[in-house]
Amino acid sequence: MPISKVGSKGIKDAELSAADIAPGTITSAKIAAGTIAADRLAGGITNTQLAGSIATSKLAGSITNAKLSNSSITVNGTAIALGASGDIVAGLDWQAVKTANFTAVSGEGYFVNTAGGAITVTLPASPSRGDFVGVVDYGSAGTNNITIARNGSNFNGAAADRVTTQTRAAEVYVYSDATLGWTVQSTSIEPAAFVEATGGTTANSGDYKIHTFNSSGNFVVASIGNQSAIVDYLVVAGGGGGGEGGGGAGGYRESNGLTVAGNSPLANPTGITIQAQTYPITVGAGGGGQAHASGGLKGANSIFSTITSTGGGGGGPAPNPRVLGGSGGGREPGVPVSCQSGNHPPVSPPQGQPGGVQGNNSNPGRHGGGGGALEAGCTDGSSHGGDGAASSISGSAVTRAGGGGGGYSTGGAPLGTAPGGDGGGGNGSTTNGTAAPGSNLGGGGGGGWNNGANGSSGVVILRYKRQ
């Protein structure tokens, strides 16, 4: 008969076997805590002998890796041994900035800097479903593109590479199967930010902002944003003063890197790429008119960044080295042609044209008109100044840099008035020349048999994308 109750001293050590205990008769309530040592358990404890779970407080020490059925875990397709040390990357493993062509590895992300030229990122060969690669433009993809080469697999179901042209774009490519191939899992584009700058008188014209400097100052670029940092310019120097001959127009230099309609034929197709800094602006004053025997004074230069427009040459007589300038001053008969050459010093496209000389021997008292931006001072006997150039850089067409009309003596046939060139050239006269009309056009002063007149000041106008 099984024993159902035993006193604390009723059984000697080792005299009670498992067969002497009826199943279910010893409950946890009948065992004092800490009274059964581990060496009193034969064969261990199986799962079927445990009700519920073992509390952490009942475990002494830790469970060794050898006691676990799995020896590793897998992260992003890579097995990591239990107990090993190292970094576990749950997403993309970002690499150092790339500046040249390279082949990507699945699970890695890359910052790609194309400042030195276009870069090709070659995707992994023989990819498996779920392989993924991240690419972030460092800031120049809008200028130098990033090509994502498919490396034999399809991209979005087609046998064609992908080209990134958006500045600061961030994309993740994931592989599906042979039919779809690689596709864009996610894409992010930084909001557009444009040039922020101050200086001069500002105005907006459509998508562009315009800074007009009628006097010297500073163009202060606070930031260049992440879009176009190209600035187009119109830099016109001060026109030359008249003497006997008309004053030459101030040098005329322009760009059209933004491809805006309405620029002059002299526009350089390349603008200036700016940085966040201060650019001093110099606006040249017009040259003073002088008594006919002295010759007019040269205009002053206008400057923006690397662009210098030369002041217009003063009107003759000879010899007057001051006739050399952006456009040449008009001269009297007998002076070598080189004395009134335009585009001095030479640049391309030319910043101005030569001044004129008397061209009609029957009227020896006539003196040449000053050169303009597009036309030389006339040599047809009329003594009018050369025409300037029209530009819409300020939002509407304005003609600037016309040459001054030549002066003449009463000994020649009557002329009435020797007109200045279109774009602010002053008129010539038998007495006193007319000052270049209008400020900041860079026109040459009119010549006069008594006194020449003043040229007008130049201007600097800048234009860039604002939206």
Image (tube, rainbow, N blue to C red):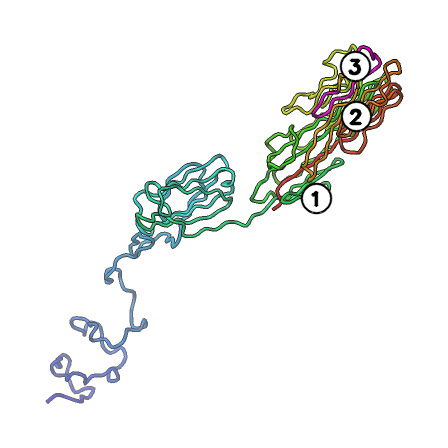
Q: Are marks 2 and 3 in contact (CB under 8 Å)?
A: no
Does the segment drawn in magenta span residue 205?
no
At 83% from the left and 28% from the top, the residue drawn is 435
Q: Nearer the viewer, residue 234 or 357?
A: 357
Q: Identify the amino acid type marked 3.
A: Gln
Residue carrying label 2: 420
At 75% from the left and 35% from the top, the residue drawn is 216
Residue carrying label 3: 358
- Residue 332 locus on image (x, y percent): 80, 14
Q: Give the SS element for disc 1.
A: strand
Q: Identify the amino acid type marked 2.
A: Gly
Q: Which mark is residue 108?
A: none
Which region shows up in magenta? 359-377
What distance separates the C-alpha of mark 2 from that of mark 1?
A: 30 Å
Q: Which numbered disc flags the more N-terminal residue, 2 or 1?
A: 1
Query: Which quarter of the image is occupied by the N terminus?
Result: bottom left
Q: Which mark is residue 203?
A: 1
What distance separates the C-alpha of mark 3 from that of mark 1?
A: 44 Å
Q: Nearer the viewer, residue 43 or 282?
A: 282
Q: Identify the amino acid type marked 1.
A: Ala
Is residue 77 left or right of 93 when viewed as pictured?
left
Q: Give the SS element for disc 3.
A: loop
Q: Residues within 10 Å of mark 1 (few under 14, many from 20)?
A: some
Q: Nearer the viewer, residue 47 or 101?
A: 101
Q: Which numbered disc flags the more N-terminal residue, 2 or 3?
A: 3
- Residue 462 locus on image (x, y percent): 67, 37
Is residue 299 left or right of 226 when viewed as pictured?
right
- Residue 68 locus on image (x, y percent): 25, 62
At 24% from the left and 84% from the top, the residue drawn is 30
